[in-house]
């Protein structure tokens, strides 16, 4: 059996649900799930309740993260029309700014040009702006990147038309980057039908042609794999108004390694997409003496083995090519043989001062 040694993986798109959604996930459980998935650094999204759009909300979330996280955590600030005056102060603390142009879970949304303009003028230039942009909203983001001559990162790109537009923008030399999720690479509309609410997320699952386009562009246009870990309880998912989103921290590496074993892309490219590019694009600190050991043995994904508080995944029962055996973070053994060993609070926060 082969054992692979990888660098600590970085997930630039995680929902940790603190404050306001602790019954779905918290910093202690979400970061345990990250370590179990070979991920040693995560960036938490701002669509909490309240959302991270004010300095006080952001400081509170950072303090809770520092007390509870088992791996390293940075936080996004959120853009909202009501709180644009806070952008410079938020920019001193948060790792990056998230702008939601399209509908999804939570109330954070930017639908007016003055707010977009404020974001691009007032957010510190050395910190990234990330966008939830679908279909023609991707063109809005590219236009803003060009107008203000500053980088824009597109979250969870899922459609052929979007990835092709980004490829064209990159060809023109525009400063845009993007991520795709494992669920948009390994599931499609047919799975959405089969899974019902458990296969519903934003962006929704694509057509087989959309999925093919993401795989084609994995070699060049796609910069990062990000989980969009978006835990919701099974009761919420089976309710009359199921929220969109699925867990992803614990299944991402196994799925992507399956792509490598199937010859769809190389292990070098996997490391670029899940470690080197996330670190470079978000300008994240190094984690010395950090590594992930993976046993390349066929393994079934099981709901029962999850550390995420939600306790389910749309990939339950699927066979993947490898499993995380051991994780070492800054010289400490933090995960081994299915057991998370890192104490709550042993992780570091990134930003937050
Ligand atoms: C996310 C969530 O639940 O917070 N849901 C989702 O379907 N992806 C929000 C988001 O990332 O759009
Ligand atoms: Zn998300």
Image (spheres, rainbow, N blue to C red):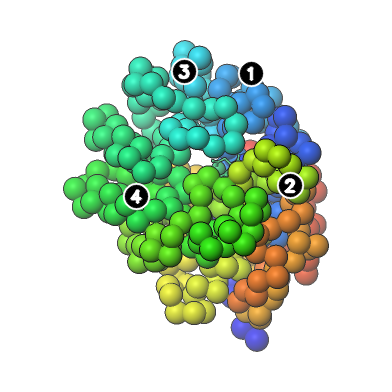
- Disc 4, SS: helix
Q: Secondary structure at mark 1?
A: helix
* Residue 173 x, y percent position in the rendering: 21, 47
Q: Which residue is mark 2?
A: 238
Question: Quick check: can you spot residue 176?
Answer: yes
Q: Which residue is mark 4?
A: 162
Ligand 1 sits in which quadrant? Answer: top right
- Taking the spot 29% from the left edge, 39% from the top edge, the residue there is 139
Query: In what quadrant of the picture does the C terminus appear?
Result: top right
Of callouts 3 and 1, the N-terminal one: 1
300 left or right of 321 in image: right
Disc on res. 56: 1
Name the foreground residue: 336 vs 215.
Answer: 215
Between residues 61 and 335, which one lies in front from this camera angle? Answer: 61
Q: Residue at x 34, y 49 (%)?
A: 162
Q: What is the tally of numbered marks visible in this picture? A: 4
């Amino acid at each position: 059996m082969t054992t692979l040694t990888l660098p600590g993986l970085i997930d630039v798109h995680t929902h940790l649900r603190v404050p306001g959604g602790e019954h779905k996930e918290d910093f202690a459980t979400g970061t345990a799930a990250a370590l179990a998935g070979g991920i040693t650094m995560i960036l938490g999204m701002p669509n909490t309740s309240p959302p991270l759009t004010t300095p006080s909300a952001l400081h509170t979330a950072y303090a809770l993260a520092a007390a509870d996280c088992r791996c390293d955590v940075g936080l996004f600030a959120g853009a909202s029309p009501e709180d644009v005056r806070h952008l410079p102060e938020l920019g001193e603390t948060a790792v990056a700014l998230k702008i939601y142009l399209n509908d999804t879970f939570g109330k954070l949304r930017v639908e007016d040009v003055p707010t977009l303009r404020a974001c691009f003028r007032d957010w510190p230039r050395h910190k990234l702006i990330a966008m939830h942009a679908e279909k023609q909203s991707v063109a809005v983001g590219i236009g803003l990147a060009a107008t203000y001559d500053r980088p824009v990162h597109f979250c969870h790109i899922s459609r052929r038309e979007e990835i092709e537009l980004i490829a064209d923008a990159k060809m023109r030399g525009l400063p845009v980057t993007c991520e795709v999720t494992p669920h948009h690479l390994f599931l499609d509309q047919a799975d959405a039908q089969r899974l019902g609410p458990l296969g519903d997320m934003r962006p929704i699952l694509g057509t087989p042609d959309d999925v093919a386009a993401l795989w084609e562009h994995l070699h060049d246009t796609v910069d990062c794999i990000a989980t969009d870990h978006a835990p919701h309880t099974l009761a919420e998912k089976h309710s009359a108004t199921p929220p969109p989103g699925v867990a992803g921290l614990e299944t991402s590496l196994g799925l992507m390694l399956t792509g490598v074993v199937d010859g769809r892309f190389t292990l070098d490219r996997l490391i670029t997409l899940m470690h080197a590019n996330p670190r470079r694009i978000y300008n994240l600190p190094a984690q010395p003496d950090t590594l992930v050991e993976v046993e390349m043995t066929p393994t079934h994904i099981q709901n029962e083995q999850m550390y995420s508080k939600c306790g389910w995944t749309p990939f339950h029962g699927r066979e993947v090519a490898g499993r995380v055996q051991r994780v070492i973070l800054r010289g400490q053994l933090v995960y081994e043989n299915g057991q998370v060993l890192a104490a709550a609070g042993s992780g570091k926060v990134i930003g937050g001062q």
